[in-house]
Image: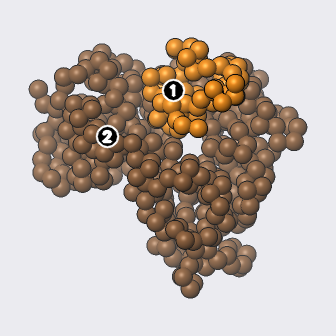
Amino acid sequence: MLPIVIVGTGLAGYNLVKELRKTDTSSQVIMLTQDDGRQYSKPMLSTGFSKGKDDTGLAMADAAAMAEQLNMEVRTHCRVESIDTSARVVHTSLGEIAYGKLVLALGAAPVLPPIAGKEHLQVINDLQDYARFHAAVQGKQKILILGAGLVGTEYAHDLASAGYQVTLVAPDQHLLSRLMPAPAGDAIAAALQTLGVSLHLGQAVTAVAKAGKGFAATLQDGSELQADVVLSAVGLKPRTELAMAAGIECGRAIKVNRLLQTNVQDVYALGDCAEVDGLNLLYVLPLMTCARTLAKTLAGTPSQVSYGVMPVMVKTPTLANVVCPVAADMQGEWQIEQSGSDIKARFIDINGQLQGYALTGACTAEKMALNGQMPPLLA
Amino acid sequence: MANEFRKWQCIVCGWIYDEATGAPEEGIAPGTLWGDVPADWVCPDCGVGKDDFEMIEI
């Protein structure tokens, strides 16, 4: 029997094997990673500074320990160059590997804004990025963050909690604008401000240049901000290049059906790089659902993914929150009840059906009740 | 009493269960010990079961 080959040792890859081993202890598994294969929790990266952790503190196990624990092989510093789906072989920087089943768990790559000086921007998308950023901010004070989405907001909170002077700039009119309506985003913005975060919304950075030992960022209105380190968190793009070059069908991400199969036999995808029945959700709850489901399929019981309600929590401990994002093309309107920083926002469609919500502060207690009124994402 | 409460952290996503505050938004009352949280309970942030939590020191 040819092995199950998994490309990528992030949350998707490692959790898939963890789930697989609960029922299938014998199938040969080979994991390939272009980094050192240390296991860590990606959601915890944006909580590391307030806990005083460097990359070593966030790493839970090295590749050798994972290989031992899950009875498999992990090939580190191994870059996959191409996939030959007819010969059922992956070509890597460490040679050819034949597969029986191939799983793509490639993740998503950070997008940089197309501005002058973008080479000065740091990103944090994996443990190695975190290590680089952590080293860059040692002994520094001022951090400029580009982007007001989940990642930018969480790092702003975490770094400010750890004592850094944080400035956040984004063209959005309010924080987390793709996840929640203005009053909820504003409540979280106010929580960040109590930690000393300075917000410049409705403004894009147009250029970043070296200035002294740090950097100067120019804003749209011509004003300038000084920073020791600039962190970009403007977006993520699912990694599709490898699949596309192999003739695997891709949309925004690698297209898979509810068995997580691509259009090519015995090639599967999950996690941030996958578009499951049209849904590319870059969150841990759907990822874990897919890991559990694909593990069953690989163990010999073909299983279809279904998604229930998929709430997301933005890690801003100063103000608890939970949000169920509304589909981009959904018609309807927000109905908002507010008392100070406690906000209950419900998105009601034209048929009166709840299609999303955002809750902050004490209103998070209503999460379960609202989940019960939400339609499943993928029934 | 209060110092007998412990905290548990999900090793997949970092979500923290604090026995003192419980998780009212998940229907778990303040003061519920981890052992008394239902066995079929899953992490609200990532959906893993109780087996994948580990205790963290306070």
Residue A252 falls left or right of residue A269: right
**Which quarter of the rendered picture does the N terminus of chain A lie within?**
top left
Q: Amino acid at mark 2?
A: Leu
| Chain letter of the orange region | B
Q: Colour of chain A?
A: brown
User: Mark 1 — residue?
Assistant: B47
Tell me the tag on residue A104.
2
Tell me the tag on residue B6.
none
Disc count in the image? 2
Q: Secondary structure at mark 1?
A: loop
Above or below A365: residue A109: below
Residue A319 falls left or right of residue A6: right
Residue A21 at least partly seen: yes
* Chain ID, mark 1: B
**Residue A233: image x %, image y %?**
55, 58
- Give the residue displayed 63% in from the left and 42% down from the top: A314
Residue A240 falls left or right of residue B30: left
Q: Using a 10 Å C-alpha cutoff, classify the residue at mark 1 as few (fewer than 14 neighbours), some (14 to 19) or many (20 or more).
A: many
**Residue A298: image x %, image y %?**
27, 24
Q: Amino acid at mark 1?
A: Gly
